[in-house]
Amino acid sequence: MPVESVFPRLEALLPHVQKPIQYVGGELNSTVKEWDEADVRWALMYPDAYEVGLPNQGVMILYEVLNERERVLAERTYSVWPDLEALMREHGVPQFTVDAHRPVGAFDLFGVSFSTELGYTNLLTALDLAGIPLDAAERTVDHPIVVAGGHAAFNPEPIADFVDCAVIGDGEQAVLEMTEIVRAWKAEGRPGGRDEVLTRLARTGGVYVPRFYDVEYLADGRISRVVPNRSGVPWRVSKHTVMDLDEWPYPKQPLVPLAETVHERMSVEIFRGCTRGCRFCQAGMITRPVRERSITGIGEMVDKGLKNTGFEEVGLLSLSSADHSEIGDVAKGLADRYEEDKIGLSLPSTRVDAFNIDLANELTRNGRRSGLTFAPEGGSERIRKVINKMVSEEDLIRTVATAYGNGWRQVKLYFMCGLPTETDEDVLQIADMATKVIAKGREVSRSNDIRCTVSIGGFVPKPHTPFQWAPQLSAEETDTRLGKLRDAIRADKRYGRSIGFRYHDGKPGIVEGLLSRGDRRVGDVIRAVYEAGGRFDGWREYFSYDLWMECAAKTLPGHGVDVDWYTTRERAYEEVLPWDHLDSGLDKDWLWEDWQDALDETEVEDCRWTPCFDCGVCPQMDTSIQIGPTGKKLLPLTVVK
Amino acid sequence: MAYSAGFTPHPKVSYANAAPTGTASEAEYLEIALADRREPQALRALLDASLPPGLDVLDAVEAHTSGFADRLTASRWELRLERVEPAEAESAVRAFLDAPSVEVQRETKKGLRTFDARAAVASLEVVRTPGGEAPDRPDTTPCAILRLVVRHLTPAVRPDDVLSGLRAAAGLAPPVPAAVTRLAQGPLDEESGTVADPLAPDRDATSVATAPGPTA
């Protein structure tokens, strides 16, 4: 039986909320299918506002992969702002999808993509609005299966009570495999209820069902072991890896948002994975190995995507875009193709490297050269060895000199504060670096009208990285150190006026740290914060550090732990970490060695151009590096007039 | 599409008198400048296909005249007031129209402004069917349907300002928010009080221009 659209009831509320257009759907390239023509129905959520969630590539890809299948339906839902939430509660309107405005509670699966842990309270809001019990244990066969994905799902323990399962790694094939299992179970008449379908999913070895595992603790609060509580479920759950990206050219028809969003451009993922080995970077660790899309595959995606959308800017996405083996030809080929068409090209996530200036020049041939962004991450040469971000100060100065010499007027530099072994001195060197950048920039541009912006935030240690054992710097120490840096930058007025300073204070990082490296006991904190009204924790205007600390102080002591225990405490080699039973492919001993190398200030190379250093991923996951060069070039497109 | 010159070129699109958020409209107009000549109906179909359901591009004509936006001197609106007796609405309308001016207030970006809502109103009436009931209402809950023609003046007087005026002049306070729809926009014929087709001058020019003439 078709479910009823909630739109008539929602529409009556829309005149009373901010930016109602974000709730109406109907975007170009969105899909609405007949309810009764699908056997398996997914509601996909990005747990933040539409303006952040719509451009998310993960949700967009899965939405299309699922909707391309016969008898499968996928719709999107985003977090509603508190103004609409209040009205929905008052008028009994449930969490809805923006496509056909169907109630989320009516779907078979409810997939939620977590790029960051700060979306956890929004998950609880959506569950509650959807009429789905917050506790997975209380759900019946008629409730959707709640699936967590995205990078934060590599440690799903803090939300273990609230989700039915978590899937780690690439989603394209995983969602199709899950769809088939749910389809078969429904066709058989849903035998064994919810437990049975979750068991079938768990048996694949690639779907983690938290309730099938018991966590046992030591008297001091550490975990003693995590053990399956039924037969047939694996001790460790594997991540998913899509090989041969050219076979998965999604999104083919990107969504064109109706309301303004954070990225007003089309994105084409030029490769997945990164082996640069930056030790703080969770994304680089959990997405190995590197798999490139070919130069011709990229050309086709850009061409088709632009025809299907009318976007005027294309971002060439990846974790370190200038590392594509044929990036020079990609940039030149695309710049040639679109020179006449007012299509802007951009290359986010580039390294400090003069070669990148050539690329940036190519991509902005006849456009404006306003700002370039680089991420040295650490202020001193020493700390950059600790984090394995191999760039010398000379490289940086040479790179920015080339940039200013080529007409760029603004350089933005990203740093982190609170890296392992860091001292005040390491951070104060950022001020010296910025001063040298300005001095060099004035020299080569023969102008005082240049700027350098230093942007810095607190470092949060993440699971599945060599820094997973590291102590996090406290919020107070972070703020003190950032204050010293600010004073140092402002001290020299000759340069200070050309240097912008933007920083994030240390408090949100502590909450992120609690959620990143938390275990199941942290779930109580999340629930308490949600119940006390916590929402949209990624937004400065909603985030409340005090609320999180109050709720942690109420719930954690009962378990014999506290916030510091999760954040500023260093872990030892033998400690069982809450995410050890989720297999990212990385060998834990290799991670530990890399952590020791970090403390010794020893760097590690990139396995794309040096021999394998045994991180463990390829043999464990049966994958391998897939990179060019293919030697092919992008030919001009046939012009149809 | 044509772009503006300068450091950051923008597509040349201009929207005239967009209806306020939360109101329906059957008469919105925009001008798009193209880099090359295109068949207006083909363009209309393409635009219509890429817009969400319910946002329909009804017509397109090639511009042969200038000052299109200046021709939009008035709008015709329908205001449905659920749970308001037509008779009550009628007496409020009479009080409003009889007043030489009706001061209303609205929160604007520059703060609370006070202005006259009466002068801009060319006509305002309650629509009645022969039986005295409002049309197309199968059930018995009362509903007053107002038709309004309002001149585009500065400061702009919007339908909700007229509703504020009805409240100010006669204490009319609809229990639920009015459903407001713009029915037409265009040049106001002061004699008949009707709003004419603003595209008419360009349509006339098109029929002349179909004869062989200068190409773009």
Image (tube, rainbow, N blue to C red):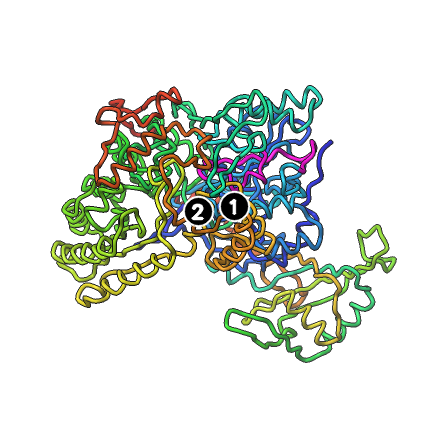
Q: Among all residues in the image, which is located at the extreme bottom?
A: B100
Residue B48 on image: x %, y %: 55, 41
Q: Can you tell which quarter of the image residue A99 is in? A: top right
Residue linked to disc 1: A522
Q: Nearer the viewer, residue A119 or B52?
A: A119
Residue A549 relative to residue B88: left or right: left
Between marks 1 and 2, how big is the CA–CA gap? 9 Å
1 and 2 marks on the same chain: yes
Disc 2 on helix, strand or loop?
Answer: helix
Disc 1 on helix, strand or loop?
Answer: helix
What's the amino acid at mark 1? Val
Q: Is residue A262 magenta?
A: no
Q: Is residue A117 above or below residue A291?
A: below
Q: Are marks 1 and 2 in contact (CB under 8 Å)?
A: yes
Q: Nearer the viewer, residue A549 or B91?
A: A549
Q: Is residue A295 above or below residue B166?
A: above
Residue B98 on image: x %, y %: 73, 77
**Residue A566 numbered tag:** 2
Residue B212 relative to residue B48: left or right: left
Residue B68 visible: no
Residue A404 on image: x %, y %: 18, 52
Q: Is residue A163 magenta?
A: yes
Q: Is residue A138 above or below residue B194?
A: above
Q: Disc count in the image?
A: 2
Residue in the image at 25% along x and 35% along y: A332
Parent chain of label 1: A
Residue in the image at 25% along x and 65% along y: A487
Number of residues whose C-alpha sits closer than 10 Å to that of mark 2, classed few (under 14), some (14–19) or many (20 or more): many
Q: Is residue A441 above or below residue A281?
A: below
Q: Which residues are magenta?
A: A138-164
Q: Nearer the viewer, residue B57 or A204?
A: A204
